[in-house]
Amino acid sequence: MHASNTRSESTPDPSAQLDVLGDECARTILIATSDGPKTAKELTKRTDSSSATVYRRINNLLESDLLAECVRFDEDGSHTTAYEATVETLQVQIGAEGIDVSVSRIDD
């Protein structure tokens, strides 16, 4: 099995990233995809949520640049859309200037 990443570059909003991570389903998706690409169907089973809920959380994670969409190729030549985590570490700092979120990317 091989995955090809199709992530586009964006500048995520730190507060949006924190909002997304406040959701248990989104955190479960991020954890599940940290060890390799997973399809929405696999994530639906993993989260024990409806497919509609999983797709909403996937979209939120994609918009926050915490998840990337990729194409997963199977040995038989078939392919499917899958998702993988893009972050390894997320650090939150609170100071006089506000809240700062710094991210360590998996591919860095």
Image (spheres, rainbow, N blue to C red):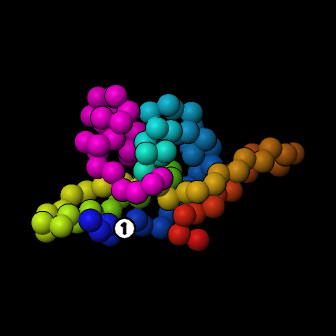
Tell me where residue 90 appears, x and y as whole percent. 65, 51
Give whichever of 97, 27 is nearer the camera.
27
Q: Position of residue 55 (x, y in %)?
A: 32, 40
87 relative to 42, above or below? below
Q: Relative to 80, does residue 4 appear above or below in the rendering? A: below
Q: Residue at x 30, y 35 (%)?
A: 45
Vertical comparison of 90 with 106: above or below: above
Q: Is residue 20 something that shows in the picture?
A: yes
Q: Position of residue 108 (x, y in %)?
A: 58, 71
Q: Which residue is mark 1?
A: 5
Magenta stretch: give its range: 34-59
Residue sitting at x 33%, y 28%: 49
Q: Residue furthest right?
A: 96
Relative to residue 41, is residue 104 drawn left or right?
right
Compare residues 13 and 42 and report the one nearer the observer.
Answer: 42
Q: Which residue is found at the position 12% from the left and 66% from the top?
A: 76
Q: Please give the name of the residue rendered at 50% of the width and 59% of the height, measured from the top-left corner.
A: 86
Q: Position of residue 27 (x, y in %)?
A: 50, 39
As drawn, is 45 to the left or to the right of 27? left
The main secondary structure of the magenta stretch is helix
Give yes or no for residue 80 being in the magenta stretch.
no
Q: Is residue 65 visible?
A: no
Q: Nearer the viewer, residue 16 or 69?
A: 69
Q: Amino acid at mark 1?
A: Asn
The stretch drawn in magenta includes residue 51: yes
- Mark 1: which secondary structure? strand
Quarter containing the N terminus: bottom left
Whether residue 82 sits left or right of residue 97 in the image: it is left
Q: Is residue 89 left or right of residue 81?
A: right
Q: For the residue carrying disc 1, how many other residues have a C-alpha within 10 Å: few (<14), some (14-19), or many (20+)?
A: some
